[in-house]
Amino acid sequence: MKYKPADRIQDLQYFGEFGGVNPSISDSSTYTFLSAKTMFDTFEGNAEGCYLYSRHSSPSNLYLGEALAAMEGTETANVFGSGMGAITATLMQLCKAGDHIVCSRTIYGGTYAFLKNFAPQLGIETTFIDITKNEVVEAAVKKNTKVIYCESVSNPLLEIADLKSLSQISKNHNLQLVVDNTFSPLSISPAKLGADIVIHSLTKFINGSSDTVGGVVCGTKDFINALRNVNDGAAMLFGSTMDSLRASSILKNLRTLHIRMKQHSKNAMHLAEKFQEDGFKTVYPGLESHPGNQLFKTMMNEDYGFGGMLTIDVGSLDKANELMELMQERNLGYLAVSLGFYKTLFSAPGTSTSSEIPEEEQNEMGLSDGLIRFSIGLDNDISRTYNHMKECMEEVGVLPTEMV
């Protein structure tokens, strides 16, 4: 039987305090106890269902965490005030001074900066490798390695990680496979493919309206409880807490994620095919020309498509900027970072979301100056959008067919 994550979300039903169809929002930072012993037991982690302090947990946050755990097929989850809050807390919970991480070379710039520049100050070393080559991953593992870290679909080059193979390598060496699934919610279910921990930036597709920042870590009860531990839990002690009002808002938006992802994927596939026909170097997992296309098909939950992210190369940063500015002027989207919005977002990642990566390393991994990353929106008539985009490309003079 196929795993259908949207069905898992749908099957959750919460009632509000007064019978509302949405759960009541807990708008409190602290909670009272009828007895001092219950407070003590809660501090010790032995009072199920009792709330202590909203930095630790709150009903609204737990509702959202439960829904996201259901989506990913993990035992439980903990939400955070940002995606980076989720990432850093997870890695710091798993690693200590003297430990080593094997990490994909193409990851979100903030994650790269943390592992490359900040973690070494704490005695944690990272080796960045081509995650698509299993033999390279295997060779990078050391005696002190604790984690293999990757993104299901990498930012911004859209490389596809072979999660089943990475899981096997992790198990062979007694490592934790941590997967950031931000680019492919619903489309890929990393825990079902062997990932130990699944992370999302909730800011992106899951929330979908670019009005809040959030993150989540999905995993076992033991790991999530360790994160929340009042004495040595990174989630508790780092303080990246999600506000209850935001958690409630994201939970509402999560209910429409399956509808949105289908449209994001449909629109992205249409544009990717058209851009490729026009002669652009186009990267989209749904194209047969993508090196990871067949691998993606073996891992995907087919209902939701190949996601809403694609890239094209227009040759130079100047031309990329000129094109993006014109597309924004014509109301085709926004020149902005982030992704998952109902309008298309576009940026040149080399000078924005991946700017933390040194230029020589960008060149080595194939992150060119002229690369434009698109987060494709929910446009009703994507053919109309394409025609307007092509007009912009003609005006700027970047259409490969015109440049021949």
Image (cartoon, grey):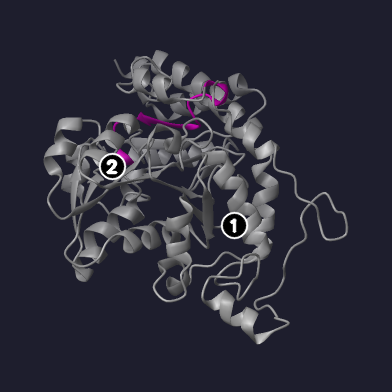
Point out the stretch of residues depicted in magenta: 302-317
Percent across and percent down for residue 321 are: 39, 42
Q: Please say whether residue 151 is one of the residues in the magenta stretch.
A: no
- The residue located at (55%, 72%) in the rendering is 55
Whole-percent x and y of residue 200? 47, 48
Task: Please report the residue visible at 70 percent of the width from the left and 81 percent of the height from the top.
Answer: 33
- Disc marking residue 212: 1
Q: Is residue 400 above or below residue 248?
A: above
| Secondary element at image label 1 | loop
Of the residues shown, which amino acid type is indicated by label 2?
Thr
Left or right: where 325 falls relative to 318: right
Position of the C terminus by quadrant: top left
- The residue type indicated by label 1 comes to Thr
Evaluate whether residue 280 shows in this view.
no
Q: Quadrant of the N terminus?
A: top right
Q: Estimate how packed mark 1 is, as few (under 14), some (14 to 19) or many (20 or more) residues with alpha carbons within 10 Å.
A: some
Q: Is residue 238 above or below residue 370?
A: below
Q: In this figure, which residue is indicated by the disc labeled 2?
A: 106
Quadrant housing residue 25: bottom right
Quarter of image, res 328:
top right
For the residue pair 230 and 340, the one nearer the viewer reads as: 230
